[in-house]
Image (spheres, rainbow, N blue to C red):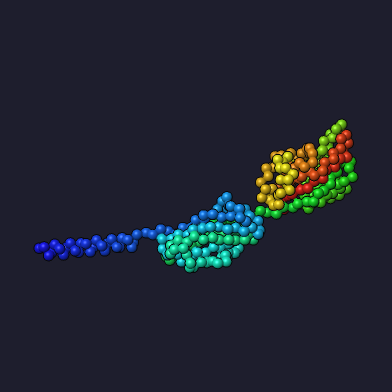
């Protein structure tokens, strides 16, 4: 009887060990994961690890950590832009991991196009995890050289096309009405006030009736900008210009107050831009003054 009890006890113990071993084997292991722990653009810390605005030639560097429950088999870093996708130099990585189930490293990419930089880890069971950084490149802008514009009784051209940086005289303005989005005039009596106006507004004011809308003249909307002259000079792409707050609810004319003032505009093509007045020599009792402007507008 004692021998039978001892045998039963041994069998029970063996079964307990067997099932305990099975439970450990069947225990779910952690899924793969990737985290971006730090990053910079040309040495300047990134404020976000999900998206960044950059220019061609910027160097993006990311520090990452990849972990798995099973052994790591591959870590890949790729750049894709919709039409193509390719691994970065040194990737995919298949050895040299920090441990069998974790690795900390870095990725560097010199920006050449807008797209997505991704880091992906794959374990021995084929499970994967990824983290991505979306890279945006601002659009280009058209920057005009300094252009002298004259009011009605001034000999200098008073009409301007920001898309090309071309100034037109009164005699050629109607033929080019569809491209003119900025004009300069001085209105009022006995004292004149200098204005930047759209072609349509100029026609409405009784000047150059040939520029009215049904002859190809277009609307442009203006507002005074809070930017300083130096702020204007620092703008090199449309990352700022695209965020200007001028809308079609603004006026089609704005009074010019002095040199080194900046104005926002929105033209009929839906392009936003900035005007800086660099010289200001308005008329007083007659519309014979002039201003010099420089513009920056979305292409």
Q: Residue at x 43, y 60 (%)?
A: 68
**Quick one: 299 or 87, which is closer to the camera?**
87
Percent position of residue 74, x then y: 48, 66
Q: Nearer the viewer, residue 45 or 17?
A: 45
Relative horizontal placement of residue 131, taking residue 272 as reference (left or right):
left
Q: Position of residue 12 (x, y in %)?
A: 20, 62
Q: Is residue 283 above or below residue 30?
A: above
Q: Determine the residue positioned at 58% across, 58% down.
A: 61
Q: Quadrant of the N terminus?
A: bottom left
**Residue 85 visible in this rendered orientation of the protein:** yes
Q: Which quadrant of the structure image shows residue 152? A: top right
Q: Quadrant of residue 246?
A: top right
Horizontal side of residue 145 vs 234, given as left or right: right
Residue at the extreme top = 190
Q: Residue at x 47, y 65 (%)?
A: 97
Residue lying at the far left in this picture: please name it: 1
Location of residue 264 in the rendering, given as x and y in whole percent from the top left corner = 72, 43
Q: Which residue is pictured at 66% across the width and 46% down the height?
A: 243
Picture coordinates of residue 27, whole percent (x, y): 34, 59
Position of residue 79 relative to residue 248, above or below, is: below
Numbered marks: total: 0
The outermost residue toward the bottom is: 95
Residue 131 visible, this angle:
no
26 relative to 40 in the view: left or right = left
């Amino acid at each position: 009887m004692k021998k039978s009890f001892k045998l039963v006890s041994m069998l029970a113990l063996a079964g307990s060990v067997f099932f305990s071993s099975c439970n450990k084997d069947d225990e779910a292991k952690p899924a793969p994961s990737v985290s971006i722990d730090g990053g910079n653009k040309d040495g300047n810390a990134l404020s976000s690890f999900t998206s960044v605005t950059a220019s061609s030639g910027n160097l993006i560097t990311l520090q990452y950590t990849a972990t798995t429950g099973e052994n790591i088999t591959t870590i890949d870093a790729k750049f894709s832009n919709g039409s193509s996708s390719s691994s970065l130099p040194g990737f995919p990585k298949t050895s040299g991991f920090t441990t069998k189930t974790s690795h900390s490293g870095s990725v560097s990419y010199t920006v050449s196009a807008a797209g997505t930089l991704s880091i992906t880890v794959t374990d021995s069971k084929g499970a994967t995890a990824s983290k991505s950084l979306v890279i945006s490149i601002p659009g280009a802008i058209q920057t005009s050289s300094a252009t002298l514009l004259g009011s009605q009784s001034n000999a200098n051209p008073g009409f301007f096309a920001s898309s090309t940086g071309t100034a037109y005289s009164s005699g050629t303005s109607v033929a080019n009405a569809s491209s003119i989005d900025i004009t300069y005039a001085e209105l009022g009596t006995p004292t004149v006030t200098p204005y930047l106006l759209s072609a349509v507004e100029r026609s409405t004011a009784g000047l150059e009736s040939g520029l009215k809308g049904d002859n190809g003249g277009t609307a442009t909307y203006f507002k005074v900008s809070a930017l300083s002259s130096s702020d204007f000079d620092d703008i090199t792409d449309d990352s700022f210009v695209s965020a200007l707050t001028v809308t079609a609810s603004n006026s089609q004319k704005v009074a010019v107050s002095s040199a080194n003032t900046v104005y926002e505009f929105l033209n009929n093509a839906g392009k936003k831009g900035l005007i800086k007045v660099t010289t200001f020599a308005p008329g007083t009792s007659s519309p014979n003054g002039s201003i010099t402007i420089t513009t920056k507008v979305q292409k």
